[in-house]
Image (cartoon, helix red, strand yellow):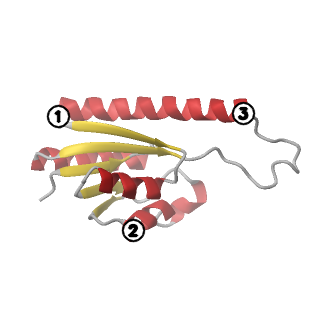
C-alpha cells in the first residue's frame, strides 16, 4: 500500500495535526516518511517603491536566513519525533517556491506514494476555505493526497 509518505508542514497548529496523522499512518504501515517544508519567496509588492521603501539585498538576505533557520528547526523537531517512533525519515526544505509546486515536484522526485497535508496553511483570509495551495496539490498531484483538517 503506502511505503513512502510525504508529510508537508509549515509549522502551524493545523499542519501539526497532519504531521501527527501522517506519522501514525507511517508507523502502522511501516512506511518511510519525507517531511517537507516550503518557504515562499521574499514578499514583494508592485507598489513598494511608490510607498518609499524598496527591499535591499540585506533585507532579502535576512529574510532568507530567517526562513532557513525556521525550516531547519521545524524539520529537526519533526525528524526527532519520527525517529523516536522508529520511522525512517528524510527532511527537505525547499526555499523560494510556492508550496503546491514544490510539494508535487518533491513527491514525484522522491517516489512518494502518498502526500499528507493540512487543509490550509498560515495565510489569514484564505483559511476560511480549503487552502489554495492544498487545492493546487489536489489538482496536480500524481499520487493520492490525504488532507487533514
Where is mark 1, residue-wise? 85
The nearer-to-camera label among 3 and 2 is 3
Residue at 37% across / 40% down in the picture? Answer: 92
Between discs 1 and 2, the one toward the N terminus:
1
| Alpha carbon distance from label 3 to label 2 | 34 Å
Query: Is 115 above or below relative to 9?
Result: below
Query: Label 2: which residue?
Result: 140
Kind of element beneath mark 3: helix
Q: In which quarter of the image is the N terminus?
A: bottom left
Q: In this view, does 43 lie to the left or right of 140?
A: right
* Mark 2 secondary-structure assignment: helix
Of callouts 3 and 2, the N-terminal one: 3
In this rendering, which labeled residue sits more in front, label 1 or label 2?
Answer: 2
Locate residue 93, reporting x and y percent. Answer: 42, 39
Q: Residue 57: give its label.
A: 3
Q: How many C-alpha atoms fall within 10 Å of the one at disc 3: few (<14), some, or many (≥20)?
A: few
Residue at left offset 38%, top offset 58%:
104
Asked whether the beta carbons under mark 1 and mark 2 sit within 8 Å of each other, the answer is no
User: On the image, which quarter does residue 62 sit in?
Assistant: top right
Give the x, y percent position of residue 148.
Answer: 33, 57
Q: In the image as oriented, which residue stretches furthest toward the bottom?
A: 139
Q: Residue at x 89, y 43 (%)?
A: 52
Residue shown at 30%/66% (left/top)? Answer: 142
- The CA span between labels 1 and 2 is 31 Å
Q: Residues within 10 Å of mark 1 (few under 14, many from 20)?
A: few
Q: Position of residue 99 (x, y in %)?
A: 47, 53
Q: Foreground residue, 36 or 116?
A: 36
Amino acid at each position: 500500500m503506502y511505503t513512502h509518505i510525504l508529510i508537508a508542514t509549515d509549522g502551524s497548529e493545523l499542519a501539526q495535526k497532519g504531521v501527527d496523522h501522517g506519522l501514525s499512518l507511517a508507523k502502522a504501515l511501516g512506511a518511510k516518511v519525507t517531511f517537507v517544508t516550503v518557504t515562499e519567496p521574499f514578499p514583494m509588492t508592485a507598489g513598494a517603491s511608490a510607498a518609499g521603501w524598496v527591499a535591499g539585498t540585506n533585507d532579502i538576505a535576512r529574510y532568507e536566513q530567517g526562513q532557513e533557520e525556521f525550516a531547519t528547526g521545524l524539520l529537526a523537531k519533526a525528524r526527532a519525533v519520527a525517529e523516536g517512533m522508529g520511522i525512517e525519515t528524510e527532511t527537505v526544505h525547499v526555499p523560494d517556491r510556492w508550496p503546491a509546486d514544490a510539494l508535487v515536484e518533491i513527491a514525484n522526485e522522491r517516489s512518494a506514494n502518498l502526500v499528507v497535508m493540512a487543509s490550509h496553511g498560515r495565510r489569514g483570509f484564505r483559511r476560511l476555505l480549503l487552502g489554495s495551495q492544498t487545492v493546487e496539490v489536489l489538482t496536480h498531484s500524481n499520487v493520492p493526497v490525504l488532507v487533514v483538517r
